[in-house]
Image: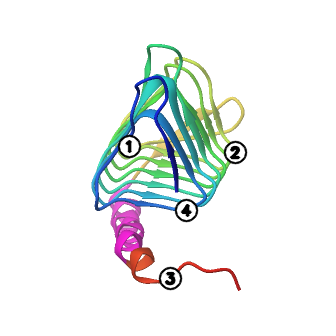
């Protein structure tokens, strides 16, 4: 992993987290316990702050940033899908951000909310707890049920296990 201090802003990464070797962590970035950061992810806290809770997963090639003096907050047990962009947003516990989604400035994603693949959450848009939002721009189309929650609890346990599983193997090109 590539970790950079930037102008006195130093990343803080829990020792149980796994950061893929080709991901980049810059500045004021705080990563919680058993959080998995995938290949190519860029978390840039150069002039803003990024806080990621415990048990979350930031998948391949995601970009997370924050405006100057502002904060991007990602809660516990959150999944950020491949190629997503999160910018100065707030994502609450257990939310799922679909692949290639965009969460724009000052938007709020509620607890257990699900954002569809490719969705664009416009600036200052709020997705309520347990809601499903899809489209460009995103619109609320439904509610999360218990079956969905049960399924995602299993999926998220897999990413949590990645922290230990990836640490055990020797990463090498073939």
User: Vertically, is 47 above or below 4?
Assistant: above
Element under disc 2: loop
Mark 2 or 3, which is nearer the eye?
3
Residues marked 3 and 1 touching at CB (< 8 Å): no
Element under disc 4: loop
Mark 3 and mark 4: span between their CA atoms? 11 Å
Total labels: the figure holds 4
Mark 1 and mark 4: span between their CA atoms? 34 Å
Q: Residue furthest top?
A: 69
Q: Which residue is mark 3?
A: 170
User: Measuring 46% from the left and 35% from the top, which residue is drawn there?
Assistant: 5
Q: Is residue 126 visible?
A: no
Q: Which residue is mark 1?
A: 130
- Report the span colored magenta: 145-164
Q: Nearer the viewer, residue 90 or 25?
A: 25
User: Measuring 38% from the left and 69% from the top, which residue is drawn there?
Assistant: 163
> Which mark, residue 21?
4
Element under disc 1: loop
Q: Reading the chain from its start, which is encountered first: label 1 or label 2?
A: 2
């Amino acid at each position: 992993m590539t970790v950079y201090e930037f102008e006195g802003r130093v990343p803080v990464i829990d020792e149980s987290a796994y950061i893929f070797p080709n991901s980049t962590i810059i500045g004021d970035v705080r990563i919680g316990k058993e959080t998995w950061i995938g290949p190519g992810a860029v978390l840039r806290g150069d002039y803003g702050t990024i806080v990621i809770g415990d048990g979350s997963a930031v998948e391949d090639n995601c970009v997370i940033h924050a405006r100057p003096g502002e904060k991007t907050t990602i809660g516990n047990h959150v999944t950020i899908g491949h190629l997503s962009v999160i910018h100065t947003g707030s994502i609450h516990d257990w939310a799922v951000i679909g692949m290639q989604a965009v969460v724009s400035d000052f938007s709020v994603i509620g607890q257990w909310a699900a954002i569809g693949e490719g969705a664009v959450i416009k600036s200052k848009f709020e997705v309520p707890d347990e809601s499903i939002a899809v489209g460009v721009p995103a619109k609320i189309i439904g509610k999360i049920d218990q079956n969905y929650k049960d399924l995602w609890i299993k999926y998220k346990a897999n990413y949590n296990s990645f922290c230990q599983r990836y640490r055990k193997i020797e990463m090498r090109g073939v």
